[in-house]
Amino acid sequence: MKQMAHGTEDLKVLAHLLRRDVIEMTSEANSGHPGGSLSSADLLAALYFNVMRHDPSDPQWEERDRFVLSKGHAAPVLYAALAESGYFEREELLTLRKIGTRLQGHPVRGKLPGVEMSTGSLGQGLSMACGMALAAKMDEKTHRVFCLLGDGELQSGQNWEAAMFAHHHRLSNLTAFVDRNRLQINGCTEENMSLDPLPEKWHSFGWNVIIIDGHDMAQIIDACAKASRSQKNPTVIIMNTVKGKGISFMENNPDFHGKVCKPDELCRALDELEGCGL
Amino acid sequence: MTGKELAQRDYYGKALADIASDRRIVVMDADLAESTKTSEFRKVAPERFVEAGIAEQDMIGVAAGLAASGKIVFASTFAVFGSGRCWEQIRLAVAYPRLNVKIVTTHSGISVGEDGASHQALEDIAIMRALPNMTVISPADAYEAYAATKAIAEYDGPVYMRLGRAKFPTILPEDTDFIIGKARILREGRDVTLIGTGQMASLCLKAAEELEKEGVDAEVLNVSTIKPLDISAVYDSLSKTGCAVTAEEHSIIGGLGSAVSEFLSQELPSPVTRVGTYDTFGESGAPAALMEKYGLTVERIKESAARSIAMKDARAPPKTAAENNEEAEE
């Protein structure tokens, strides 16, 4: 069965659920990348519960929309979205990063239903998504391909090779998202290796560019709808986001790129999410 | 023993054109289609030919995405770029998820010639062989390249196949078959096994013919699938001959010689002398002059055979009294 499209109020609740899952699973694993998972949680909720055509009971459904998590370190939020969608039991989330698990530290194609591609080495996902979008065009299929990029990984040149490729091949069925939280391991992206002016870069590569608040559910849905109407060019949705979004002490804190909550922090984090209507 | 001189890349192009009717096949290139001969596929199936531009890393990612959507993807460029520039992309996007991508490169080895070291792949077998899930193939001649292209299209999984630029002698029949993972005995012998891959297999045959005149009975094994190595063929041959020479147009570090030595050292310790380039880059020059200068010659294979045989004899256990008596009677 195709996934039901939820309204924005439901989606907000679902995003909080994903955040709770992320905090719980990374804390249980005592490793992982909560910061970048939290900044992407609203998008993942919107994609998996509204935008994408997919069927958790038939992960290989040929007409499904594809999602490639180029920023593979945000695996926890992808796993949470898959579990909440029903691809596998929620209990399995707590096996994240443990030996023998299907929930590897970074996503692996073929291990867990719903994971389309192996990622984790940054800068490669957009090329893979281009291949999927091109295959759909060749086969005259109508499904769409979505790819979530971190902003830091745009420092890698392969993204711009892929950006050129997507425009050259008129991959209008491809939508890329940039999780523009402006932080990478080393600190601020603009101090580390500046990306601005980012919209102009994408423009000059021939992409449609939409800039939104990546935590505003209505804006996310609206931008995805606009992207799906493109007949000619691929679309990038630059989402201004807050790393660690949803947990006060994690927000905009680069320490939580690859560090998880200590036990007392975990309680505080869950309390904060509780206050958001869970 | 040897036949017409033909270029492997021409037969790669021919094979791609011949299998183009399979609509699952997509061919990619990085601005070198006329050189790699993927242009032959482009002629007959332009709608399934994808130009990546001079962007090998992106080419591999796109190839993986296509394969993940059910396509059988051939991605081609020169061996240096197709193995080295995008090694980590191959690792993550192709080998790790075991996707159906065939990386077929041309211009491997030192016989690239005048372009010089930047374009001469002497390390590609080593770095591709190290990847889990990867099959590594280096056909002996143009006919085998043709058959191998068809065979890898049938096989579901990642493959790296290296081909040459120059024409070199064919040693197999025009209608040869190709079975992935099967080595071929080109000539039987008892004293030493000459194990060749790529065009060095034909040099091994030539060396064996000359050695015969000198009273040495050499067996010649064509190992065109370097990974998975046909260990039973190597074992059986070495059980008989007791020593070997490996020959490849590649560094002696990590290639065929390493693969054979790694296996033998654990299963059947035997003297092995490796013919290949010695931890060095190549340079510009005519292909034949380079082969000569870097020791990729029939002469070097013969010397190596003598060396391996001498090592085998030197470490043979002392003869028993009975054996000595037998010899005395003869």
Image (cartoon, coloured by chain):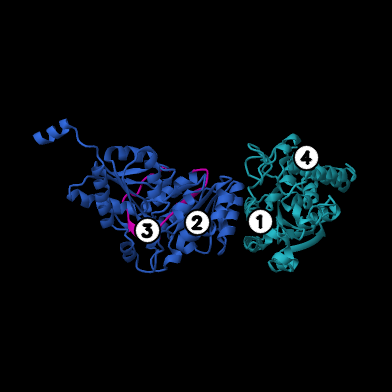
Q: Distance between the residues labelled 2 and 1?
A: 21 Å
Q: Which of B103 and B268 is in front in this view?
A: B268
Q: Position of residue A89 (x, y in %)?
A: 74, 34
Residue B266 visible in the picture: yes
Q: Residue A255 sits in which quadrant? A: bottom right
Pointers 4 and 3 in contact (C-beta within 8 Å): no
Query: Both on one chain, marks 2 and 1?
Result: no
Q: Where is residue B90 in the image (x, y as percent from the top left)?
A: 55, 52
Between disc 4 and disc 3, the foreground one is: 3
- The colour chain A appears in is cyan
Q: Say whether residue B102 is magenta.
A: no
Q: In this view, does B215 lie to the left or right of B39?
A: left
Q: What residue type is labelled 3?
A: Tyr
Q: Which amino acid does label 4 sit on?
A: Glu
Q: Which of B220 and B42 is in front in this view?
A: B220
The tag earlier along the polypeptide, 1 or 4, is: 4
Query: Both on one chain, marks 2 and 4?
Result: no
- On the image, numbered disc 2 is attached to which residue? B83
Q: How far apart are marks 1 and 3 (CA)?
A: 39 Å
Query: Both on one chain, marks 1 and 4?
Result: yes
Magenta residues, dominant SS class: loop
- On the image, numbered disc 1 is attached to which residue? A126
What residue lies at 87% left-to-right and 46% top-to-bottom?
A272
* Number of numbered discs visible in the structure rendering: 4
- On the image, numbered disc 3 is attached to which residue? B278
Q: Position of residue A206 (x, y in %)?
A: 69, 66
Chain identifier of the residue bearing label 4 in the image:
A
